[in-house]
Image (cartoon, grey):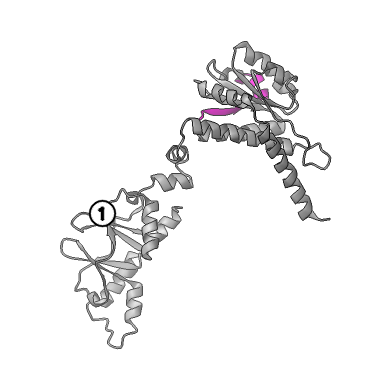
Amino acid sequence: MNYKEIAQQTLQTEAQTLLESAKNIDDVFDKAVEMVLACKGKLIVTGVGKSGLIGAKMAATFASTGTPSFFLHPTEALHGDLGMIGKEDVVLAISYSGESEELSSILPHIKRFNTPLIGMTRDKNSTLGRYSDLVIDVVVQKEACPLNIAPTSSTTLTLALGDALAVCLMRAKNFQKSDFASFHPGGALGKQLFVKVKDLMRTKDLPLIGADTKVKDAIVKISEGRLGTVLVVDEDERLLALVSDGDIRRALMSEDFSLQESVWKYATQNPKTIEDENLLASEALVMIEEMKIQLLVVTDSKKRVQGVLHIHTLIEKGIS
């Protein structure tokens, strides 16, 4: 059996369904977008079975892209949760057949409060279709299932139409990256847009040494500091230079190397620094990568050391 071919046929069938639906988008979709935009409450998504699973994902997408939304299971609604639907809300109900028993049971109660209802179904004349103010057509010519039974193409189309609705709402609201990150402060984008150098830099127990420190003492300080580097400063803790364990290893190759020498001989003088601790950590990472360094020192305007930011810290915290 050629599984690769079966997989290709499945994807092609579902892709064709999406392409056909794209050609058939009509004014109803525009009206659905406008209805949700005019909503002063929440967009409540409901459905059972596979439609319910798709609906839950839709609600999560809406909520994370600036449209207040949550998923309501019809069975729970029948047992008290109908009270979660307010007068200023809009309901998006999903049922491919339009005849799901649990969903059909709550439709009269939704309309009793004159709550705007958008239906997603293949049949405008179904129970869901008749109760809906607007019907978004999710009819498919063929399920990807070889028996043409299991919801495959139809669920893919429904999910894609939900994404299309979410994208339209994002565009209408001018929803930006910063807005998205506000809803995902712990995600990669949130970290990229909100985490600053001051949030991650190390400020305590910094490995500071004077310019006259002997190499052997600098090595001890490197080990204690756990940064692979010591900071050479003057009496006012103004940064003068850096000495890394790599600098020491390279110095060992010299015939006149001595542990009793001043570490200044092997120091990297006038190293790269930043003064803005409010710089985004993601921007600091770009600097570190471009300069091919591991440690970025943060100073004040007088070059006094305020803290250090190591590339390992950025990686561990998921900054990219």
Pick the front one: 10 or 255: 10
Residue at the extreme front? 23
Residue drawn at x 71%, y 34% is: 50
Residue 213 image position (x, y, % from top left): 21, 73
- Residue 150 image-quadrant placement: top right
Amino acid bearing label 1 = Glu
Residue at the extreme bottom? 255
Q: Within 10 Å of the Cα at label 1, are there few (<14), some (14-19), or many (20+) other Cα atoms?
A: some
Residue drawn at x 78%, y 50% is: 6
In the rendered image, the quadrant that contains the N terminus is bottom right
Left or right, 311 with reference to 96: left
The answer to whether residue 262 is visible is yes
Question: What secondary structure is found at the residue carrying circle 1?
Answer: loop
Residue 26 image position (x, y, % from top left): 64, 27
Residues in magenta, as a range: 67-81
Residue 192 image position (x, y, % from top left): 42, 48
In the rendered image, the quadrant that contains the C terminus is bottom left
Residue at the extreme top? 112
Q: Is residue 240 magenta?
A: no
Q: Is residue 78 magenta?
A: yes
The answer to whether residue 73 is visible is no
Q: State the residue position of label 1.
A: 275
Residue 13 image position (x, y, % from top left): 75, 43
Q: Relative to 121, say whether 293 is above or below.
A: below
